Amino acid sequence: MTSRILIIKHGAFGDIMQAEGALRDIRENHPQADITLLTTPAFRAILEHCPWVDHVMVDAREPRWRLDRMLALRSRLREGRFDMVYDLQNSKRTAFYYRWMLKGTPWSGTAPGCSHPHKAKAPKKIRTLDRLAGQLRDAGLNVKWSLHPDLSWLADDVTELLQQAGVTSPYIVLVPGCSARHPQKRWPHYDKLAEKLIGDGWCVAMAPGPDEMELAKTIPGIRITDVKGLLNWFELAGVLKNAAFVVGNDTGPSHMAAHLGTPGLALFGSYSPAERTGIIRENFGVIEVEDLAELPVDRVQAEMMKRLKPQSNSV
């Protein structure tokens, strides 16, 4: 009999990117299982393309005082008749789901009383990838991919798109924005960096999201959105995968680039330790400073040039 598995991963975007390896490990440990992933509406399109899951269920995370919505979600979850739940979100909300909606179902995570508890004493202080790997090991799984996410399946062929936008290889992608809710994550000197890179003969490109469209207009370089409009996730992944280098803030596209294997650099202020985010890879480094506004352009450019793969630019 085929087992039925539920994985819970609501977000955020960078966390979704980092969970790819854990999803693959769950699939490889349950090759015949029917796997459903519970996520939020923003990530449905991405995860419907994920080769490691069979179905995507959307959870709008309605207020818990909306009992009608909570009852409807409980009904949907119970109809799934799941044999096992891997809670990769491990939030107060998902602990509530365990307690009120799926009590008694075998459950991996940090929900009090669950059958397969993650044994780490302070999981929120552990690097994301280590935390995911540790949770799956505690659930008795063989772990191979959790520490090595690979988002190659996410990237579209963007050859024609890049040609239409006038982007020539090799090119460098700048990710100057982030969610409007976190302005402290934005390094304010991308315009000066772009000027230096273009002066050195590099093709500089940007694919800004909705919160960065106006910001991108102040930075020299090619805005791919001027030709295409907003890119979807798969086009963005294609642009990042084919870049010679990516430099960006602590934001989703930077995490995506890191797990696509693209060489790059993320810029962090003091708000969050970079090591804990899981963005640091062999191909992707970080600069951490107390105040991003004080991080000089020359330091960023020097670190970029050290990390760039040996190749000729357009000069």
Image: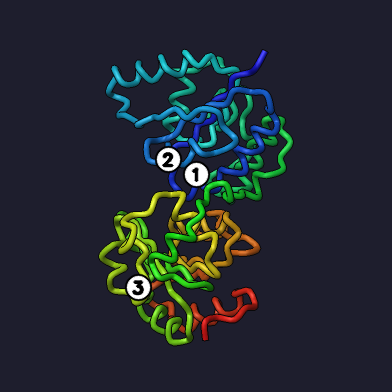
> Where in the figure is residue 130, as x and y percent of width and height?
63, 47
> Where in the figure is residue 18, as x and y percent of width and height?
55, 48
Q: Residue at x 71, y 30 (%)?
A: 140
Q: Amino acid at mark 1?
A: Ile
Regarding residue 126, the answer to whether it shows in the image is no
Split into 4 quadrants, where in the image is the N terminus? top right
The answer to which of 139 and 44 lies nearer the viewer is 44
Q: Residue at x 30, y 64 (%)?
A: 226
Do the residues bearing badges 3 and 2 touch, measured as CB atoms within 8 Å? no
Q: Residue at x 54, y 39 (%)?
A: 50
- The residue identified by callout 3 is 188
Q: Amino acid at mark 3?
A: Pro
Between disc 1 and disc 2, whose residue precedes? 1
Q: Amino acid at mark 2?
A: Phe
Do the residues bearing badges 1 and 3 touch, measured as CB atoms within 8 Å? no
**Residue 184 sits in which quadrant?**
bottom left
